[in-house]
Image (cartoon, grey):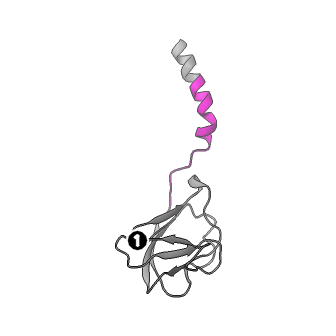
């Protein structure tokens, strides 16, 4: 009987956490390549759909150039406040980590041009 009471107490403490658990993703994944060049280029032209569950952007391993991203709807630059991704780095946005950006995302390559991988749902 005592174990049942302890278990019930633990479940009671976890109830708020379990109530906010994220549902399993559903729907089609979209995977695209975007080439970032010497001037700011749209990664996602316009705000992502309000139902977007996550966005992952990767500068592939072996990439020749760092790619800079702007998530605030402005043009990307090769300096702050844009965010730089070196070869092999990625950034993920999702409600589980806080939120998904609601503005256009832009990129620029530090030199030449560089294709990045974009996955979103």
Residue at the farthest left position: 62
Q: Where is residue 8 in the image (x, y as percent from the top left)?
A: 58, 23
Mark count = 1
Instruction: Please state if 65 lies on the left or on the right of 98 as rendered.
Output: left
Residue lying furthest front: 79
Residue 78 in view in this figure: yes
The answer to whether one can see residue 28 in this image is: no
Q: Report the residue at 65% width, 78% height from top.
A: 74
Dot 1: element: loop
Q: Residues within 10 Å of mark 1 (few under 14, many from 20)?
A: some
Quadrant in the picture for residue 77: bottom right
Q: Which residue lies furthest to the top in this view?
A: 1
Examine the image and state in which quarter residue 73 appears: bottom right
- Residue at 50 percent across and 62 percent down: it is 27
On screen, residue 38 above or below 31 = below
- The magenta segment is 9-28
Residue placed most toward the observer, 21 or 100: 100
- Relative to 107, 19 lies left or right: right
Q: Is residue 55 rendered magenta in the image? A: no
Instruction: Identify the residue at horizontal 60%, vertical 39% (top origin).
Output: 17
Q: In which quarter of the image is residue 33?
A: bottom left
Per the image, the residue denoted by label 1 is 87
- 36 is higher (above) or lower (below) than 17: below
- The percent coordinates of residue 41 (x first, y second) are 55, 83
Q: Position of residue 80 (x, y in %)?
A: 60, 73
């Amino acid at each position: 009987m005592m174990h049942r009471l302890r278990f019930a107490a633990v479940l009671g403490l976890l109830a708020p956490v379990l109530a906010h658990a994220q549902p399993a993703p559903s729907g089609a994944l979209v995977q695209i390549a975007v080439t970032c060049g010497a001037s700011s280029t749209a990664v996602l032209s316009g705000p992502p759909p309000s139902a977007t569950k996550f966005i992952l952007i990767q500068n592939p391993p072996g990439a020749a150039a760092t790619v800079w991203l702007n998530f605030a709807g402005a043009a990307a630059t090769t300096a702050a406040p844009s965010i730089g991704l070196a070869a092999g780095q990625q950034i993920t946005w999702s409600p589980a980590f806080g939120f998904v950006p609601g503005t256009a995302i832009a990129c620029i390559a530090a030199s030449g041009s560089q294709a990045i991988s974009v996955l979103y749902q």
